[in-house]
Amino acid sequence: MHIIQQFKHQLQCCKIKPQMAMVLTALFVTLTGNFTFFGHLNTAYPWAQNSLFIISVGIMLWALSCILCILLNWFMPVKLAIFIILLTAALCSYFTDGFGIIFDQEMIRNLFATDTAEATDLFNLGMLGHVVLFGILPIMVISQLTIVKQPKLADIKRRAIFTSLTLFASVVIIGANLFTFSGQYASFFREHKAVRFYTNPVEPMYSFVTLGLQNLRSASSDQYVFKTTRAAIPDTDIASELVIVVVGETARADHFSLNGYTRETNPLLSNEKDLVSFSQISSCGTSTAISVPCMFSTDGKDDFDVNSSKNTENILDIVAKADISVLWRDNNSDSKGVAERVPYVSYKNPDTNPICDEECRDEGMLDGLQEYIDGQKQDVLIVLHQMGSHGPAYSKRYPVEFEKFTPACQTSELSMCTSEEIVNAYDNTILYTDYFLSKVISLLKHNTPKYETSMIYVSDHGESLGENNVYLHGMPYMFAPEAQIHVPLIVWAGASSDVDIPKTRTLKDIPNSHDALAQTILSILEVESDVALSPTPALLKRKSVIW
């Protein structure tokens, strides 16, 4: 204790100008928060031949970090600005270095859409140690330093001059580096765009600000956008439809034995003869916050705008307009705005979900569902949003009796598990999804032939399991690995359904995407509408007419 007190006293005696404090902070986060960035940079430009260029890039990153510190300091005290920079860099570097996660706009949006339970899975001793070492301890040191204050009467003027001069100096440093290594920078920006997404804390803070500005613009416009003026069931359709859409979470197509995976992860579904598994489906995004609203949008991936989606009529709104009963049951964080205008029930707690142990299970969403169906007098569309295979705590996603593949990783600290243990735990989640979907099909069979019954299962996005040292999901779509965008899509149809399973099976290997879901929901419910849908290959065929 005496040594600590002496150290604190020495620090308090140290006086440092705010300029120097911010410059040193920027240097610290550049050196300690960018191991992954410099690793990728070294892969693209080996050190032996490009040492001066890599040093130049480091200087540019340091200058950009200085600019961040200075801009923050204009809105808040210098110590608070430094604390924000240090904590941001420490947190982001843990997930970037450990999981290969990139903090672009999509990931920042996904973080804000994450609920408490999902966030808790990400906290572990490894993260705590990393944040303490590279965030908390430097903050404690800075907090004990005496930062020289400018005279109060001239404070604003001096801050303005300091900000301008420092920004100018940073720009000059950046410009000098660009000029000196212009050829290599031209190649770097053109051929290695993905590498810049790893810059820390530049990319996370830039993404946070731009996302915030986008949300402010969206919030200022509350005009509701209609996509159709007419939606109805034709009088000639006298049969009642019962359709259940299961939205999966973090499932990748290549881990379904229905798609050729060597492990038997679909033992129950493989026994269903009236089922088709589509093998070439691409997701709309790499995160739930993007993919879920996008797959229920009528616009399609290329035209989808997540910022306006909450105020835009989606496929559930159109179905409800056709006087069809719509219900969304959710065992995930929420519907991401899709179910804003239809009945919605969360099954994340024991008050509604009767099947809860370590966490509430997807199977609980089926509780009381038959009673709900019995009470409907028109066609019915039910959406069940799974917790599915959400990582990194894969072992929490399934009851213990589904731990078939062992040894399975039992922690969210994936670095403590072998690749085999991670894959085993993940495959057990797929096994539980197989069981859950078989229960859904059993429910639908019970309602055949009173209804024309069918099920559509599709995952929101995939998951990286350590391939090329990348884990989880949320990578920018432009260079996301196939594991994060290649998703399973399964259709089951009851004997009374109009879906022609043998003919539909001929379409199962045709490349398609989430864009097909809106069209398929309208078609399977036989809704006539003037909505303009994104053009996409047909997913299904009817027994009499091609959809």
Image (spheres, rainbow, N blue to C red):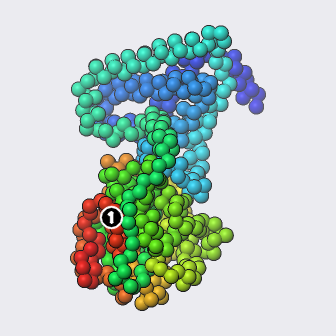
Residue 89 image offset from top left, x and y in percent? 51, 36
For the N terminus, give its image quadrant. Answer: top right
* Residue 377 makes an appearance in the image: yes
Residue ID for mark 1: 530
Residue 502 image offset from top left, x and y in percent? 26, 83
Residue 70 image offset from top left, x and y in percent? 52, 23
Instruction: Tell me what residue is drawn at x 45 percent, y 78 percent.
Output: 379
In terms of secondary structure, where does tag 1 sit? loop
How busy is the neighbourhood of tag 1: few (under 14 within 10 Å), some, or many (20 plus)? few
For the C terminus, give its image quadrant. Answer: bottom left
* Residue 98 makes an appearance in the image: no
- The residue at the far bottom in this view is 449
Instruction: Tell me what residue is drawn at x 33 percent, y 64 percent.
Output: 530
Instruction: Tell me what residue is drawn at x 65 percent, y 9 percent.
Output: 153
Q: In the visual, does 61 lie left or right of 143?
A: left
| Image position of 137 with respect to 153: above or below | below
| Image position of 61 with respect to 281: above or below | above
Which residue is nearer to you in this view: 178 or 296?
Answer: 296
Amino acid under disc 1: Asp
Residue 196, by quadrant, is top left
